[in-house]
Image (tube, rainbow, N blue to C red):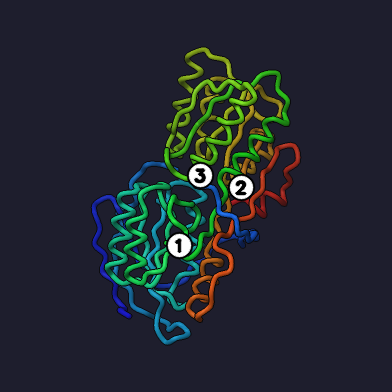
Amino acid sequence: MKKKLALMLAAGMTMASVMGCGGSGDAAPAAADTETEAPAAADTETEAEAPADTAAADTEAEAPAASGEMIKVGIINNDPNESGYRTANDADLKATFCAENGYDASFAYSLKNEEQINAAQQFIQDGVDYLLLSAADTSGWDSVLQDAQANGVRVILFDRTIDADPSLYEASIVSDMRAEGDKAVEWMKSQNLDEYNIIHIQGVMGSAAQIGRSDALTETAAAEGWNIIVSQTANWNAEEAQQIVQSVIDSGESFNVIYAENDNMAQGAVAALDAAGITHGVDGDVKILGFDTNKFALEELLAGNWNYDGQCNPFQSSYIDDIIKTLESGGTISEKTIIMDEKGFDAETITQEDVDTYGI
């Protein structure tokens, strides 16, 4: 296998090589195995370009794999700066897929599907053994996956599902974003409010997280007669979310729930409420829901400033590593899909131990 990997991609796509292991932070909460495919809806965040200072670099193999050669891996992810979730996810992958563990790994980052597809095609051309993918969008991947299969490149999905024939990838280690949304919506129902007037702040449209979390709310709202005042994307971004909430405040329309599809957007929404002197949280006028269990979000719950936060587990690398080792030893994968075990946290019951254990 080549020890140097030269990467050439379209503008806007950031790629970097990993030459050593780094710490991944807190240990990953356990994942539950299941043979049921995760819904095509499934995570996470801003439409900013990936950092320009992580340009392509050459990688020298430093430690042999069990076979005596490095396992060549191309990893396509979303911008690690988009959220605390994505930063933790990226650090977890880099801690595992490094030279000390027998991997010659290169990373590509973008929040745009077309750029991710270009990166995947480049990795296939460069002869990687494995392509690890967290897709920006659920659609458009069939051709790339078919090319990978034709060239002997094994594909493993992580974090997000895609709309593709399961025969085109080896395994999928993902969050069930619809289940995350369903948990949050069930919590909303349990509040038994006299009326539900909801500001719905969506993530990047077409991403698995946006689809799953949005569908859970909109379908329940229709069935229960809840009023969704506005449903608008903030692209996982706090400032855009603040603007959406500010525009509703300026309109004079009454609302009592903010359902934000990630913690950053919930944080931006709360900033608009604070600026307008509108109370929120356990004893406030507006219920605040977020997702991802960033530590700052769980601390807001513990303080009673927010009401609910849904976990999105970013720690998938150990499961991917196990799958690769199984395949490299000639074994087969018994579980096509691994659904990450995830919780929902209520401000009324959350503890400091929860914050310390699950905050990312």
Q: Residue at x 58, y 36 (%)?
A: 216
Classify 168 as above or below 71. Answer: above
Q: How many marks?
A: 3
Q: Residue at x 62, y 59 (%)?
A: 34
Q: Secondary structure at mark 2?
A: loop
Where does label 3 land, which residue?
Answer: 41
Alpha carbon separation for disc pair 3 and 1 = 19 Å
Q: Secondary structure at mark 1?
A: helix
Assess disc 1: are there few (<14), some (14-19) or many (≥20) residues with their C-alpha within 10 Å of its C-alpha.
few
The amino acid sitting under disc 3 is Ala
Nearer-the-camera pick, 329 or 203: 329
Assess disc 2: are there few (<14), some (14-19) or many (≥20) residues with their C-alpha within 10 Å of its C-alpha.
many
Q: Earlier in the sequence, mark 2 or mark 1?
A: 1
Nearer-the-camera pick, 25 or 228: 228
- What number is the disc on residue 311? 2
The amino acid sitting under disc 2 is Gln
